[in-house]
Image (cartoon, rainbow, N blue to C red):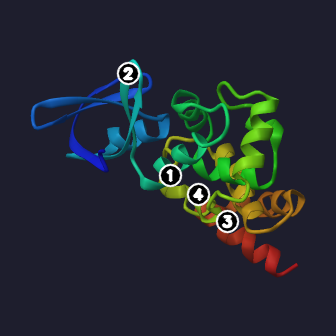
Amino acid sequence: MYEYIKGILEFVGDDYVVINNGDIGYKIYTSNASIVNFKNALEKVTVYTRLVVRDDDMSIFGFATREELKMFQLLTTVTGIGPKLALGILSSISIGNLVGIIISEDINSLTKAQGVGKKTAKRIILELKDKVDHKLAMLEPTLIPKVQILEDDHEEAVSALIALGYSRGEAKEAVGKVKNSCKGIEEIIKNALKFLSNK
């Protein structure tokens, strides 16, 4: 029904924001990463949305990027995963890391997400392994909150390299070799790829 809603950020809750558009306040459930992006916006924010209709409720779920919305929609296609659980996963694991985890079939890392046990993790990997966009791992710098600590950047870089076809061992070795001389994830990935190509 709604492709996106553009307006002024009026309020921020734990898992939702209120966007004022034409004197109407839209309560939109969203992820931690999107909340950070909305807070950093200078003027109006654009929220890419999906309306979820149930017998007793209508809720809007929305995100700062189309990529995060697409991942949300993919997660809700998995058996047993509803919108709130999908939102919890996206609030626990950033998109690039999530893509890397799914591609590498890393069940243990996926169980760190809010509300995800081993059975659910296996189901997510089985049903989404061939559907996720591998390029999302490389788009990670534009999607994750800028407040994440450097150690998270190291793990994001490892996941991105795995998504490009390298083994976890190769990826960890390359990131370990270059991480101390790099300032951000883009530089880590770039230099790690140079290291791997020269091996």
Q: Is residue 133 left or right of residue 14?
A: right
- In the rendered image, the residue lying farthest to the front is 55
Mark 2: which amino acid? Asp
Q: Are marks 3 and 2 in contact (CB under 8 Å)?
A: no
Residue name at image x 43 percent, y 34 percent: 30
> Quarter of the image holding residue 100?
bottom right
Q: In this view of the protein, can residue 108 be seen by the observer?
A: yes
* Residue sticking out furthest to the bottom: 198
Instruction: Tell whether 148 sits left or right of 5.
Output: right
Pointer 3 or 2: first along the chain:
2
The residue singled out by tag 1 in the image is 70
The answer to whether residue 54 is left or right of residue 123 is left
Q: Which residue shows up at 33% across the image and 38% down it?
A: 39
Mark 3 element type: helix
Disc 3 marks a residue whose amino acid type is Ile
Above or below 175: residue 6: above
Local packing at callout 1 (Cα closer than 10 Å; few below 14, some 14-19, many 20+) is some
Q: Which mark is residue 184?
A: 4
Instruction: Name the residue tied to disc 3.
Output: 189
- Give how far across and how far down residue 160 sits, in percent: 69, 60
16 vs 168: above or below: above
Residue neighbourhood size for the residue with mark 2, other residues' Cα within 10 Å, grouped as few (<14), some (14–19), many (≥20): few
Which comes sooner in the sequence, label 4 or label 1? 1
> Which residue does the numbered mark 2 point to in the structure image?
57
Three-letter code, disc 1: Lys
Looking at the image, which residue is at 60% across and 63% down?
Answer: 138
Residue 45 position, x and y percent, is 26, 45
Helix, strand or loop at label 1? It is helix
Q: Earlier in the sequence, mark 4 or mark 3?
A: 4
In this rendered view, identify the residue nearer to me: 4 or 141: 4
